Image (cartoon, helix red, strand yellow):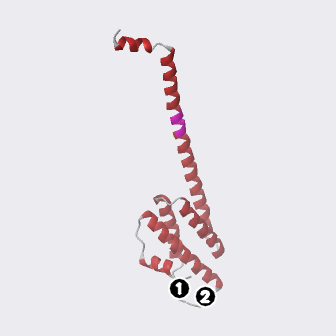
């Protein structure tokens, strides 16, 4: 009996059917596992963006609310330090930094002092996000991040 004849007969046996079923099950399992992993990754990304939106909304409030938003952005940058996340954090922080230009007055009212602290924290986050994204850091923002609160 030649090899092709033997192979033809073997493909019609229950042993071949069993092996084919196991191979099909392994392929199906891998496909389902990949789909579940992709779904989990998508859910995590959506959750990150929902939290980023929430943190962004805090930035437009008073100084205390902005401080909460900054703390949330700090955590979000740690959780997802990818380029898209870093780009979003950079844009949000740049907006906060640019809204209130730095002042050199030493005796500021308490609310403005808190705002200055928030700017300092925003500059630090901007620098961290820029480094994570490999993006350039403007000198005035680097100076603000390095300055003492």
Q: Observer-nearest residue: 134 or 106?
A: 134
For disc 2, the marked residue is 108
- The answer to if 51 sits in the magenta stretch is no
Mainly helix, strand or loop, the magenta region?
helix
Q: CA distance from mark 1 to mark 2?
A: 9 Å
For marks 1 and 2, the one nearer the N-term is 1
- Of all residues, the one furthest to the top in this rendering is 1
Q: Answer with left or right where residue 135 lies relative to residue 68.
A: left
Q: Position of residue 138 (x, y in %)?
A: 42, 75
Q: How many marks?
A: 2
Of 17 and 35, which appears nearest the observer?
17
Residue lying at 59% horizontally and 69% vertically, measured from the top left:
70
- Residue 9 against residue 65 in the figure, above or below: above
The answer to the question of whether label 1 and label 2 lie on touching residues, with beta carbons closer than 8 A, is yes
Q: Quadrant of the N terminus?
A: top left
**Which residue corresponds to the image point at 49% horizontal and 69% vertical from the top-left?**
128
User: Is the residue marked by circle 1 packed among few (<14), some (14-19), or many (20+) residues within 10 Å?
Assistant: few
Q: On the image, which quarter does residue 74 sit in?
A: bottom right
Q: Position of residue 11 (x, y in %)?
A: 44, 15
Where does the magenta region start and end? 29-33
The quadrant holding residue 122 is bottom right
Where is residue 110 drawn, in percent x and y?
Answer: 65, 84
**Image coordinates for residue 53, horizontal then vertical, percent:** 59, 61
Q: Is residue 67 left or right of residue 140?
A: right
| Residue behind mark 1 | 103
Front residue of this view, candidates 79 and 2: 2
Q: Is residue 54 above or below residue 121?
A: above
Q: Quadrant of the C terminus?
A: bottom right
Task: Please indicate whether residue 103 sits to the left or right of residue 113 in the image.
Answer: left
- x 56%, y 44%: residue: 39
Helix, strand or loop status at disc 2: loop
In the rendered view, tell whether residue 111 sits above or below residue 91: below
């Amino acid at each position: 009996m030649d090899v092709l004849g033997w192979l033809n007969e073997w493909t019609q046996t229950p042993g071949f059917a069993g092996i084919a079923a196991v191979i099909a099950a392994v392929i199906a399992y891998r496909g389902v596992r990949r789909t579940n992993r992709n779904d989990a990754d998508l859910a995590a990304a959506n959750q990150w963006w929902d939290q980023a939106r929430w943190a962004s909304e805090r930035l437009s409030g008073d100084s205390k609310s902005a401080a909460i938003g900054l703390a949330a952005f700090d955590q979000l940058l740690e959780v997802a330090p990818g380029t898209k996340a870093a780009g979003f954090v950079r844009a949000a922080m740049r907006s906060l930094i640019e809204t209130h230009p730095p002042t050199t007055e030493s005796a500021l009212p308490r609310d403005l002092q808190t705002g200055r602290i928030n700017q300092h924290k925003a500059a630090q986050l901007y620098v961290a996000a820029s480094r994570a994204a490999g993006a350039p850091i403007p000198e005035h923002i680097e100076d603000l991040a390095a300055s003492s609160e």
